[in-house]
Image (cartoon, coloured by chain):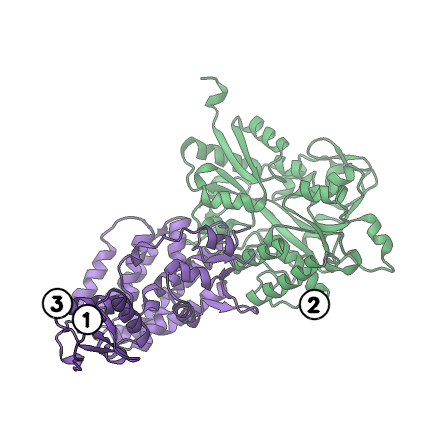
Chain colours: A purple, B green
């Protein structure tokens, strides 16, 4: 019997944080850091009024992280409470004249970090990781997801976790049981077939659209990479690279975001093959290389309809191969899963 | 170095019921090799075959051939090197019930050009079929005393309230789900589009009923191999359960009068065959081919016929059985003498007739073959929920 959720929760060291969360990326942290340096450098003179709403507007974020950042600056005695809606730069007890200014006019160098990805929403920071952890477990049993341990694990709020889980639910990977617990797995061949069926419909259409923008050099580079290794077998990283070359770099070279999202929701199929390559045995390279090569050759010949047909055939053949591999995964039992996942059985 | 240690050593992975000591000794004596048996229950054996192809040379498998092929644990067998290949029974499609389903021995037998397995003959095979047979529920003879009239034997009895608390099932999910499905189909609780290849929802329905039955105490126990099933019936208070042929005869030896039923719905068919590890080569590969050929010679088939199995080459096995043995085990006739099992112990008494009748009568009544269904992964997980419920 697997360890219960409560046992798992209590046994996890509280100071343990995944390495990719080491960088401070939370909204309140960035707002606080930027304001602090603006005050210290003198850009925000003593007396400058900082209303929550104006600061939130300046950074393009909601009010709660701004409120938290301002409280931290107040605790550091860099600002003090002016009234219910805002603060004034400078320590409390000083008799300053309030300077009410349009914060947007000040050169804060704030806009740049907002646009470069540092300020990703909390759910975005962990979405891919949680999804991957759920994908990793779903072939192997029915797992109950603990929101509380998930919050602890990633050091985020319930709201953030619910955002993440709702989005994963939208992709069909998890569902709620009759007691309203989030449940992942067990993965059925039917579900896998559905993912392949969607890819078979969507990817050829996307490839035809993408063929207008793909350059011969770009395609040749990928075709030549097929032959760069003479290995008869594909391990997990090599398989991943091969799949990305065709199914992401070429098929998804389109502008239609909705189509990209729809295709990406079916990446479970790639995951099963990667799990198989990692846990059972490497995957024979010859057939996959031949199928990919045919798609590239058709693209180079400027026959996108033929390329789409070759891609459709490849996805159909991959469906059959992957289904056999999922059957083999049935022999594995005690796989390592994330601490917020507990076996239902 | 001793003379003995220069003999090739062949590591054979397989189940308790097939890798018995008389077979191992006979192989060593006939082939001049050392045979090292690696015995496991069916699920453990396939797990070892998939995850450690280095650790065995020959795998005596049981309806798992497509799995070990997908995991590249086995290598193709050159049928040209197998004497008696053309004599293997069940390669033709005769004796087939119209509603028979599941993967029979021929479905994944031959390697095709695209590296997949199929029934279309080629000169490379995934396995050498060695044995086959049928299984059905077994029950203590006194169970019949409580039945009024001429009610025929049925799979539905496994889930019948009349034997509440006295029923056992096999732990193996592939076997267990088929038997439960046969029981529920027969009792009219559920219908299946293909009982040999169940759908996700069908598995859910079966497992839900089984969990409820388990929670109200219908099942007395579960077993992973024959000896466990025998203990459940001899000392565990079980009067009705899925059971394998050798167990029926071993129980009779110790005075437990067990009937191997002939269910009106048909039997669950099974087959076994030998696969070559993908890693075996050189002198050991030669020894492995010799071992494969030996299995079709008739001698091992005859030995295991004495516990109720059928040899893949029945005509060859017949030459190693005496007439009375052949008449009981294959012809379905009453025996005029006591007969012994593979260990030389009396297992059939003079006057007995085999339950279900002759080879033809029993094998032509297969309703569904053991197989790894398309939904095997889903099934294994849901089955575990049932066993842990």
- Residue B218 position, x and y percent, is 73, 56
Note whether A188 is above or below A100 in the view shown: above
Which of the labelled discs sits on residue B189, or is there none? Answer: 2
| Camera-side mark, 3 or 2 | 3
Q: CA distance from mark 3 to mark 1?
A: 13 Å
Which of the labelled discs sits on residue A90, or is there none? Answer: 1
- Secondary structure of the residue carrying tag 1 is loop
Mark earlier in primary sequence (3, 1)? 3
- Residue B259 position, x and y percent, is 78, 48
| Camera-side mark, 2 or 1 | 1
- Quarter of the image where one finds residue B329: top right
- Secondary structure of the residue carrying tag 3 is loop
Quadrant location of the N terminus of chain B in the rendered image: top left
Residue at 53% from the left image edge and 30% from the top image edge:
B35
Quadrant location of the C terminus of chain B in the rendered image: bottom right
Residue at 50% from the left image edge and 34% from the top image edge:
B11
């Amino acid at each position: 019997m697997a360890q219960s959720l409560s046992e798992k929760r209590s046994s996890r060291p509280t100071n343990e944080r995944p390495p990719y969360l080491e960088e401070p990326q939370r909204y309140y942290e960035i707002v606080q850091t930027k304001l602090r340096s603006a005050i210290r450098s003198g850009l925000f003179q003593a007396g400058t009024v900082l209303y929550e709403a104006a600061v939130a507007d300046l950074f393009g974020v909601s009010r709660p992280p701004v409120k938290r950042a301002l409280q931290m600056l107040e605790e550091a005695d860099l600002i003090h409470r002016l009234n219910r809606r805002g603060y004034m730069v400078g320590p409390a007890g000083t008799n300053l004249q309030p300077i009410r200014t349009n914060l947007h006019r000040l050169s804060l160098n704030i806009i740049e970090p907002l646009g470069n990805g540092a300020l990703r929403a909390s759910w975005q920071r962990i979405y891919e990781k949680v999804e991957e952890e759920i994908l990793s477990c779903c072939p192997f049993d029915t797992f109950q997801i603990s929101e509380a341990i998930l919050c602890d694990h990633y050091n985020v709020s319930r709201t953030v976790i619910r955002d993440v889980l709702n989005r994963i639910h939208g992709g069909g990977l998890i569902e709620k049981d009759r007691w309203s617990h989030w449940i992942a797995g067990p993965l059925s061949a039917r579900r896998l077939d559905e993912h392949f069926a969607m890819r078979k419909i969507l990817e050829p259409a996307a490839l035809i659209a993408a063929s207008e923008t793909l350059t011969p050099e770009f395609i040749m580079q990928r075709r030549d990479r097929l032959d760069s290794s003479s290995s008869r077998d594909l391990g997990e990283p090599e398989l991943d690279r091969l799949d990305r070359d065709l199914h992401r770099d070429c098929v998804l070279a389109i502008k239609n975001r909705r189509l990209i999202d729809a295709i990406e929701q079916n990446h479970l199929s790639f995951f099963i093959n990667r799990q198989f390559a990692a846990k059972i045995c490497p995957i024979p390279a010859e057939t996959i290389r031949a199928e990919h090569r045919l798609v590239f050759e058709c693209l180079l010949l400027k026959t996108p309809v033929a390329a789409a047909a070759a891609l459709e055939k490849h996805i159909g053949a991959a469906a059959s191969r992957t289904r056999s591999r999922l059957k083999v995964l049935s022999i594995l039992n005690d796989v390592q899963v994330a601490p917020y996942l507990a076996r239902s059985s | 170095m001793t003379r003995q240690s220069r003999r090739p050593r062949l590591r054979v992975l397989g189940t308790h019921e097939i890798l018995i000591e008389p077979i191992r000794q006979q192989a060593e004596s006939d082939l001049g090799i050392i045979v090292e048996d690696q015995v496991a229950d069916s699920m453990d054996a396939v797990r070892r075959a998939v995850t450690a192809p280095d650790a065995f040379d020959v795998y005596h498998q049981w309806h798992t051939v497509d799995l070990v092929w997908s995991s590249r644990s086995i290598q193709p067998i050159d049928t040209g090197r197998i004497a008696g290949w053309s004599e293997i029974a069940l390669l033709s499609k005769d004796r087939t019930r119209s509603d028979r389903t599941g993967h029979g021995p021929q479905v994944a037998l031959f390697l095709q050009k695209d590296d997949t397995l199929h029934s279309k003959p080629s000169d490379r095979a995934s396995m050498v079929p060695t044995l086959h047979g049928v299984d059905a529920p077994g029950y203590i003879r006194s169970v019949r005393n409580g039945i009024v009239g001429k009610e025929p034997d049925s799979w539905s009895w496994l889930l019948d309230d009349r034997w509440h608390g006295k029923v056992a099932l096999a732990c193996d999910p592939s076997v267990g789900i088929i038997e439960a499905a046969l029981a529920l189909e027969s009792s009219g609780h559920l219908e299946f589009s293909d009982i040999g290849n169940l759908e996700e929802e069908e598995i859910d329905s079966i497992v839900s009923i089984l969990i409820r039955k388990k929670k109200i105490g219908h099942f007395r126990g579960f077993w992973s191999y024959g000896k466990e099933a025998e203990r459940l019936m001899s000392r565990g208070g079980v009067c009705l359960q899925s059971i394998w042929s050798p167990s029926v005869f071993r129980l009779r030896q110790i005075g437990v009068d067990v009937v191997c039923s002939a269910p009106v719905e048909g039997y669950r068919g099974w087959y076994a065959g030998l696969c070559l590890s993908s890693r075996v080569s050189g002198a050991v590969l030669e020894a492995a081919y010799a071992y494969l050929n030996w299995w079709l010679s008739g001698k091992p088939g005859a030995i295991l016929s004495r516990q109720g199995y059928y040899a893949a080459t029945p005509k060859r096995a017949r030459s190693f059985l005496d007439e009375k043995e052949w008449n009981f085990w294959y012809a379905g006739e009453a025996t005029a003498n006591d007969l012994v099992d593979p260990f030389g112990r009396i297992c059939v008494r003079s006057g007995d007739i085999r339950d279900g009748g002759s080879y033809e009568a029993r094998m032509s009544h297969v309703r569904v073959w053991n197989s790894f269904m398309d939904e095997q992964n889903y099934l294994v997980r849901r089955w575990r929920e049932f066993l842990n419920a």
